[in-house]
Image (cartoon, grey):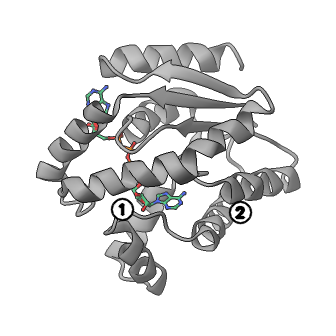
Amino acid sequence: MFNLILFGPPGSGKGTQSEKLISKYGLKHLSTGDLLRSEISRQTPLGMEAKNFMDKGQLVPDEVVIGMISSALDENAEAKGFLFDGFPRTSAQAEALDNLLELKKTNIAVMLALDVSEDELVKRLLKRGETSGRSDDSNEQVIRARIVEYRTKTEAVADYYRRFDKVVMVKGEGGIDDIFNSLSLEIDNRL
Ligand code: B4P
């Protein structure tokens, strides 16, 4: 099994690159953002709870997302590997993921971290907000709050994986295909 984490601030291209990577490598895409938005659109109790946090640009509580990932791993026991997109976003989530993967006798091969400047992030998210219908993309204050959440709670997750020498920084600005080629090269080196 080959498992990788695509990491980076909101708007860094995780969702965009994940779509291309899963089709090239046949990995199962697990995006906590997509899973949460699906719960919201189905108006489940979990979705209603998550929406309160997401609309303010805050992270959803750890126990909610860890539970979601745990179920998704069980539902996809036959996958040849997972691409984690937007998860883990806190140190508690990183530890929980390690434990879940250990139960399956596997681990994280690499964390690919997209590096993008804050100005570019805000520009991209506001642009997506014009068409996506995502309430967390259309308001600059909420976008800035998401970036603060990233700096205060999520950035430390990279330090967690650095301890195991698993982090590779990749330039996340420029053409989508160029970034995809850089990510692919790092994966090919580890397969
Ligand atoms: P996510 O759905 O994970 O969304 P994101 O981080 O905002 O965006 P992503 O990085 O995937 O976007 P992309 O760059 O592809 O999270 C949303 C919310 O859910 C969070 O704020 C939080 O509340 C909650 N949540 C999710 N996971 C959680 C967790 N584990 N714990 C707690 N809460 C959690 O796209 C951005 C735009 O840039 C697109 O329009 C794209 O077209 C464009 N773009 C991409 N690459 C580009 C390039 N190279 N050049 C120009 N534009 C580019």
Specify the farthest residue to the left.
Answer: 130
CA–CA distance in space, label 1 to label 2: 29 Å
Please identify the quarter of the rendering in which residue 166 is found. top right
Q: Nearer the viewer, residue 72 or 128?
A: 128
Which quadrant of the rendered structure holds the N terminus?
A: top right
**x 18%, y 60%: residue:** 133
**x 35%, y 56%: residue:** 145
Q: Residue 71 location, x and y as percent?
A: 66, 67
Asked whether mark 1 lies closer than 8 Å to ligand 1, one says: yes
Type of residue at label 1? Gly
Q: Secondary structure at mark 1?
A: loop
Which quadrant of the rendered structure holds the C terminus?
A: top right
Q: Which residue is mark 2?
A: 74
Q: Nearer the viewer, residue 14 or 9?
A: 9
Q: Which residue is mark 1?
A: 57
Relative to 116, is 135 on the left or the right? left
| Relative vertical location of residue 7 with respect to residue 41 in this rendering, above or below | above
Q: Residue 123 location, x and y as percent?
A: 20, 37
Specify the farthest residue to the bottom.
Answer: 45
Circle 2: is it few (<14), some (14-19), or many (20+) Cα within 10 Å? Answer: few
Q: Nearer the viewer, mark 1 or mark 2?
A: 1
